[in-house]
Amino acid sequence: MKNTFKKLKSKLLSTTKLHLEEDFQDENLDLNDICFYDEDGRLKELIERRHNKIINFCNKMLIWDILICMCFLFFYSLTLNFLFIILIKIILIKIFITFIIKPKETWNFIKEVFNA
């Protein structure tokens, strides 16, 4: 049973090393230069480097997501602000027209509504 486990472990390590060598062929790196096996025989440094690459990629994607969301929220808030300002202007103009330009007609209308 122990021998089977050791064979399985060595086969797993050899296939892992083979796949990692294929992964780093594009970078012109020698696997022996960047891999140091720890006491358990695992590819410690190479795994850490791949882990760091994944973390860096995720951080870059997270930064882009945050920037896109901030831009969207900025333009959305600008749009809402403009709509809100336009709405307030319309209301103020309406109040100005009804109470300042035509006050008698407005007050007569209010009296008619409450008296009816």
Image (cartoon, rainbow, N blue to C red):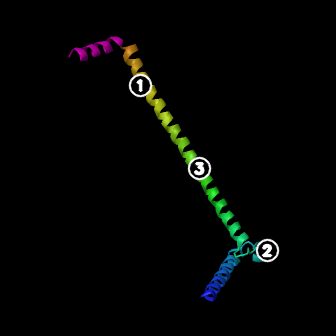
State the separation of the CA atoms marked 1 and 3.
37 Å
Residue 109 percent coordinates (x, y): 28, 16
Residue 67 percent coordinates (x, y): 60, 49
Query: The C terminus appears in which quarter of the rendering?
Result: top left
Q: Which mark is residue 73?
A: none
**Secondary element at image label 2:** helix
* Residue wearing tag 1: 91
Q: Are marks 2 and 3 in contact (CB under 8 Å)?
A: no
- Please tell me which of labels 1 and 2 falls first in the chain: 2
* Residue wearing tag 3: 66
> Camera-side residue: 53 or 73?
53
Q: Residues within 10 Å of mark 1 (few under 14, many from 20)?
A: few
46 to the left or right of 87: right
Q: Residue at x 57, y 45 (%)?
A: 71
36 to the left or right of 83: right
99 lies above or below 7: above
Q: Residue at x 42, y 18 (%)?
A: 96
Q: Residue at x 68, y 81 (%)?
A: 18
Q: Which mark is residue 33?
A: 2
18 lies above or below 27: below
At label 3, which amino acid type do we have? Ile
- Please tell me which of labels 2 and 3 falls first in the chain: 2
* Nearer to us: label 1 or label 2: 2
State the separation of the CA atoms marked 2 and 3.
37 Å
> What segment is highlighted magenta in the picture?
103-116
